Image (spheres, rainbow, N blue to C red):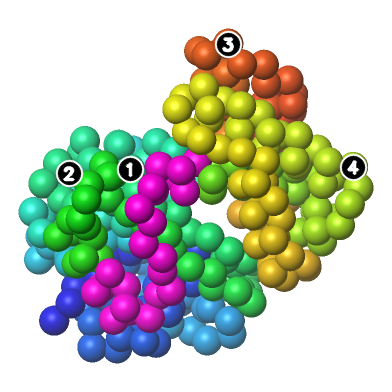
């Protein structure tokens, strides 16, 4: 029996957990959660697109059989705690799939679980939204993943992950140059997540020409410049490709960062603008738009009393 563990039942994590539950009912699917959060999930489950799913919950410290697949879908600032909670979930044959935003989570997970297979991966095109009624999405999108180091042939871990995703009904694409794909998703988030969060606006605002879309693409052009300084061959074509994906998303849906901003929760600005600014300074690349975005969100955090 396939064992799949999920940590992080926000919009993305819940959407994929529900898909697995619906597509692969014979799998042993479990959610890693402790304390009051674990109790809430045990009693109320998670509602996705109007359907309540009661997924078994395991405490982080429980001695359990290591999972075949671990899906990590927490926020960036929650990753250190998630790594601690996954200690009993990961064994030498486990595939650890990070669906976090940013460009650093896989390195942290690889260091924590050196015997596991940790691909570079991104979730693309999902427009899930979480509110008091649960999680809903109109487009599940797909997962792009690939080996951390390019080789002439795919690794055994990559092939194992593909079979797990096929069985789970999760759309996916295997990338030969996954570092470029990871940075492409970083470019996406730095633009659309931050601008829609700043303006507390749905995708519709940036799906059409105007100041919001212009601000978004200027922030993304700074990622192109910083990425090239880091040896990643991003170009203007990568922004164009994103705009094509953007047109497929529900216009009334919100990015995860916009949802956090509207709820006055801590945002992932440190992993977005903060990382762009840090790498820009390291390589001598100006990042004026992301400089302002970083300070704007840090000010919002101060206003909301979060850190």
Query: What's the residue at 31%, 78% (across, down)?
Result: 166
Disc 2: CA contacts within 10 A as few (<14), some (14-19) or many (>=20): some
Up/down of 125 relative to 213, above or below: below
Does the magenta segment cover residue 173?
Answer: yes
Give the magenta part as a residue range.
162-183
SS class, disc 1:
helix
Read off the residue under disc 3.
284
Relative to residue 169, is residue 105 depicted above or below? above
> Are the residues flagged by discs 2 and 4 in contact, CB closer than 8 Å?
no
Mark 3 or mark 2, whichever is nearer to me: 3
Label 2 element class: loop
> Badge 1, how many Cα within 10 Å: few under 14, some, many 20+?
many
Q: Is residue 255 left or right of residue 142?
A: right
- Residue at image location 43% in from the left, 74% down from the top: 171
Q: Compare marks 1 and 4 and give the one earlier in the sequence.
A: 1
Residues at marks 4 and 3, CA–CA distance in whole angstroms: 27 Å
Do residues under tags 3 and 2 come within 8 Å of each other at their CB atoms?
no
Q: Nearer the viewer, mark 4 or mark 3?
A: 3
Q: Which quadrant does the N terminus fall into?
A: bottom left
| Residue 125 found in image quarter | bottom right
Coordinates of residue 176 in the picture (x, y in percent):
35, 53
Whole-angstrom CA distance, mark 2 to mark 4, is 44 Å
Taking the magenta stretch, the answer to whether it contains residue 198 is: no
- Residue wearing tag 4: 211
If you read the primary sequence from the N terminus, does the residue marked by circle 3 or circle 2 appear first?
A: 2
Q: Nearer the viewer, mark 2 or mark 4?
A: 4
Q: Which residue is mark 1?
A: 106
Q: CA distance from mark 3 to mark 2?
A: 34 Å
- Work out whether 252 lies above or below 100: below
Picture quarter with the C terminus: top right
The residue beneath circle 2 is: 113
């Amino acid at each position: 029996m396939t064992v799949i563990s999920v940590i992080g039942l926000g919009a993305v994590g819940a959407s994929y957990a529900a898909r697995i539950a619906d597509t692969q009912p014979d799998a042993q699917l479990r959610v890693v959660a402790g304390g009051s959060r674990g109790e809430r999930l045990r009693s109320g489950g998670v509602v996705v697109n109007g359907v309540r799913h009661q997924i078994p919950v395991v405490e982080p410290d429980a001695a359990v059989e290591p999972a075949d697949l671990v899906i990590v879908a927490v926020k960036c600032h929650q990753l250190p705690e998630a790594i601690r909670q996954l200690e009993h979930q990961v064994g030498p044959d486990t595939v650890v799939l990070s669906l976090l935003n940013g460009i650093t989570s896989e390195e942290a997970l690889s260091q924590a679980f050196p015997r596991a297979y940790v691909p570079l991966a991104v979730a693309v095109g999902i427009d899930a939204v979480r509110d008091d009624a649960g999680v809903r999405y109109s487009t599940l999108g797909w997962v792009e993943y690939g080996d951390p180091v390019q080789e002439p042939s795919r690794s055994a871990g990559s092939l194992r992950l593909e079979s797990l995703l096929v069985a789970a009904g999760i759309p996916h694409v295997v990338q030969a140059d996954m570092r470029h794909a990871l940075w492409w998703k970083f470019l996406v988030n730095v633009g659309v997540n931050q601008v829609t969060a700043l303006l507390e606006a749905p995708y519709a605002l940036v799906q059409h020409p105007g100041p919001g879309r212009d601000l978004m693409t200027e922030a993304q052009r700074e990622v192109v410049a910083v990425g090239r300084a880091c040896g990643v061959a991003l170009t203007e074509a990568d922004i164009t490709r994103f705009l094509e994906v953007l047109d497929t998303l529900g216009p009334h849906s919100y990015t995860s960062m916009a949802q956090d901003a509207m709820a006055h929760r801590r945002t992932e600005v440190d992993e977005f603008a903060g990382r762009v600014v840090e790498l820009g300074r390291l390589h001598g690349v100006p990042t004026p738009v992301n400089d302002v975005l970083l300070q704007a969100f840090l000010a919002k955090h101060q206003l909301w009393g979060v850190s």
